[in-house]
Image: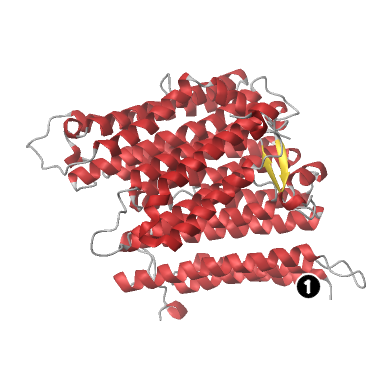
Amino acid sequence: MLPDLLAVGVPWAVASIVLPLAVALAAIALGPHARHLVLPGALLGAVIALAAAAQVLAHGAWHHAVGGWLPPLGIRLRLDGLAASFLVATAVVACGVAGFSRRLFEPSARRETRAGFAFWPLFFVMWAGLNAVFLGADLFNLYVALELLTLTAVAMVALDGKAETLAAAIRYLLFALLGSLAYLLGVALLYARYGALDLGLLRAAAVPDAITLAAGAIMTAGLMAKTAIFPLHGWLPPAHAGAPTPASAMLSALVVKASFYLIARLWFDVLPAAATVETSQLFGALGAGAIVFGSLLALRQEQLKLVIAYSTVAQLGYLFLMFPLTGSAAAPQPWAAAAWTGGMFHALAHAPAKAAMFLAAGLMIKACGDGRLAPLAGIGRDLPIACFAFGLAAVSLMGLPPSGGFTAKYLLLTAALASGQWWWALAILAGGLLAAAYLFRVLNRFLIAPAEAAPRVAVARRDQAIALALAGVSILLGLASLVPYQLLQIGRPAAAVGGLS
Amino acid sequence: MSPILYAATGAVLVGIGVFGLLARTHLLRRILAFNVIGSGIFLAFGGLGSRGPGSGVDPVPQAIVITGIVVALAATALAVTLVTRLFEETGAVTLPGEHPAEGPDAS
């Protein structure tokens, strides 16, 4: 690649938002022919994300003032290591899902289906919304991006129009809308207090007073409802399990991370001064609760996709352990940076693993014509590649070496022990054991001999290979963790090293 | 008439809306409650734009409120579509497991 293409000022960040939006509009215009756009669009999106990451690796973090307008009037995009790594993770998952769904929504010979028409515009607007959240450096712009994400996500859940998924979509919408409004109320309070919406200006001005704390608390509560952190997780399993398979993969792998990402940005980048030991410990307690309850509920499910959805509830819990483990500035923790990096690494490693698991599960359900666990007996013989993909993704979710999940949990565990907060170490270890329990319960079913030979619908090897490739990425993140690790350190917030508050 | 009046009215609207969203089960009522909360926040936000008599108005909250209204409209449209579809499929106007309360919700 030519070096000048990566110079500071080349708007890869803007391109990563504009391209998916343009593809979405073109997909609406092209109707049934939209599927020809999908692979070029997705691959171009991946190239842009990689270029943005290369730009950050070469020149460090930088701000792009959209249209040349500087804050407080203008809106900026912030491209740093964290944003770039989420852009790349999104692009990897999106490419996998695009390749997987290309023929799934192919119009039948007779007529175009509603899902086939709606899926691709929703998919690309969702991608644009995710990138806008990861790059946003303006609280209100982030609100618009979040809403874009919510509306596309809810529409995707409702895509097949069955009564149960409609109810799941409405429940999701109610949670998400209340969450968005809470976030907006917090934005209004911060604007009233500081007269700024730009994250950088707010960080410079923020002081730990009552209004700031109230705004931070309201915004966090709203974002937690959107992240489905325990005990606000009730909407997630029916919505993620009921959605069409490619939508489940996007929702569980990426969409819930966007609101978590904003919570992390809010506390580490904007309001580190307002955080206290109590708020950090509360976040950690919610995370630990999510790990234990999500895992226990995953153990009790009889539907394959519900097991995976409850596993998402559990895995999201790890992200919130990052807050207590970075400690506070008053009591700096020697491993604060490891805790922050571990939490972010977990969010990144979980994305391809969970997408691979949902895609593999979708293929198995298609082969059996049944979403329950019992009829899956012996499916390892019929869909060996999909089962291997599920197994590899499970390795990452359990946190076994050499996967990306292992690297993340190892960093978190080290931080917990080094800071003397052994109770969080217990939650991490219990989560790993419980994940092994609920995933081996499923894997075991794949491998036992069926009572009688069950009829299976044939599934294309290429679709199974896509699930395997995504699972491979989650393992690769552990084997080659140095580059993403370095990338995450670029433009890392000071609070991630010195501790919150 | 100070911004406090707008902020206080906005706070009351948010309170009414949150109550409606949590206490009512009829989905159309919940969508209306969502809009009441939104209006409360927009009112408070708009009132914050006041910079005292004679010194004009801060345009940023106005721009934000207009954008917010557009977003709320889109969300309401999606919600109403989903509820209509749910009614066509099942004849229900509440989420499964929740029943319309007696009294004002019974219709």
Q: How many marks?
A: 1
> How far across and how far down the image is residue B81, in percent?
43, 70
Element type at marker 1?
helix
Q: Residue at x 37, y 52 (%)?
A: A35
> How far across and how far down the image is residue A254, in percent?
48, 43
Question: In the displayed structure, does residue A490 sit left or right of residue A294?
Answer: right
Q: Quadrant of residue A52?
A: top right
Q: Residue at x 71, y 52 (%)?
A: A214
Residue at the limit of the structure toward the front, as seen here: A2
Q: Which quadrant would the C terminus of chain B be assigned to in this image?
A: bottom left
The one nearer the camera, A491 or B95, is: A491
Q: Quadrant of residue B38?
A: bottom right
The answer, for residue B14, to whether it is visible in the render is yes
Q: Residue at x 61, y 45 (%)?
A: A262
> How far across and how far down the image is residue A11, in percent?
66, 43
**Amino acid found under the numbered disc labelled 1:** Leu
Residue under pointer 1: B5
Residue at the limit of the structure toward the left, as seen here: A452
The one nearer the camera, A152 or A399, is: A152
State whether residue A222 is above or below residue B1: above
The one nearer the camera, B105 or A166, is: A166
> How far across and how far down the image is residue A414, in percent?
56, 19
State whether residue B89 is above or below residue A247: below
State whether residue B81 is above or below residue A429: below
Q: Quadrant of residue A474?
A: top left
Residue at the limit of the structure toward the right, as seen here: B54
The one nearer the camera, A490 or A218, is: A490
The answer, for residue A230, to whether it is visible in the render is no
